[in-house]
Image (cartoon, grey):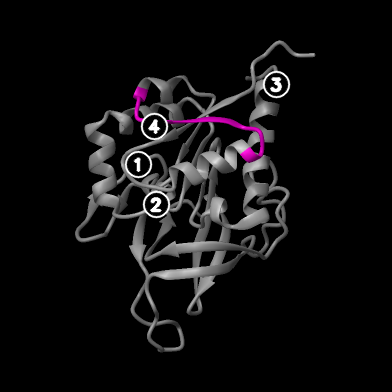
Amino acid sequence: MSDLPPPRAAIVDYGTGNLYNVRRACQHVGLEAAITTSPEEVLSADAVILPGVGSMPEAMLSLELNGLSDALRTVAGRGTPLLGICLGMQLLMEEGSEFTRHAGLGILSGSVVRFPDRGTDGAELKVPHIGWNAVGRPPGSATAWRDTPLEATPDGEYMYFVHSYHVVPANTESVVGVSRYGGIEFCSVVSAGAVFGCQFHPERSGSQGLRIYREFSRLLAGRQHSPLR
């Protein structure tokens, strides 16, 4: 038996997001997680979860004012597992375009753009995109979900989305999941090193979403017991 304590995740509280739903999902799969506004707690955690709903510029302002933006960049830079959810995934990018161009955390290269007013068939596109949608591997990327929280998820599984904007990573290799809305293919999952982001809400996606939290917890436990840690 190992004497190591179980891995501990910090859920970043910057004034928005489904914080308690995320914590309940973590508890359901046996992952110790605490909601925090403290940069010190973020820096000392074994993993960090960045949830979020709402406006990207307002979220960035809150992160900056509370010293959380630098803490998030630090944990990402040193390889601490970081999970961004919905707006949290968008915050990982270099810049957004909501209201005006503005900076993101810059952890991943790329931008955040709004869905167009019309789909590929020319019909008016209802924005925000709300509801269940399939998440699949990019074409030709059969192993894209290996060693990620999606590893146990079937290709084409449906997850719950609520968003008007989506990410456009500069590095296409970081795009490990795609979805379609109005005929438009968009990036719905990113993965780069220890950074993982999903545009959908796994904590609102039923048993298939809980599977993602369970895999995230399993990966943390494996990392904790790895001699390379």
Q: Residue at x 32, y 55 (%)?
A: 54
Residue wearing tag 1: 106
The residue most toward the top is 3
Rendered image: mark on residue 72: 4
Q: Secondary structure at mark 4?
A: helix
Disc 1 to disc 4, how far (Cα)?
10 Å
The residue most toward the left is 100
Residue wearing tag 2: 87
Which amino acid type is marked by label 3?
A: Ser
Disc 3 to disc 4, how far (Cα)?
23 Å
Q: Residue at x 58, y 38 (%)?
A: 26
Which amino acid type is marked by label 4?
A: Leu
For the residues labelled 3 and 4, say whether their Cβ atoms are less than 8 Å apart.
Answer: no
Q: Classify 10 Å Cα crowding around label 3: few (below 14), some (14-19), many (20 and above).
A: few
For the residues labelled 2 and 1, say whether their Cβ atoms are less than 8 Å apart.
Answer: no
Query: Percent position (x, y) of residue 53?
Result: 37, 53
- Membership of 29 in magenta stretch: yes
- Nearer the viewer's eye, disc 3 or disc 2? 2
Q: Is residue 159 above or below residue 209?
A: below
Query: Percent position (x, y) of residue 93?
Result: 38, 47
Residue 175 seen: no
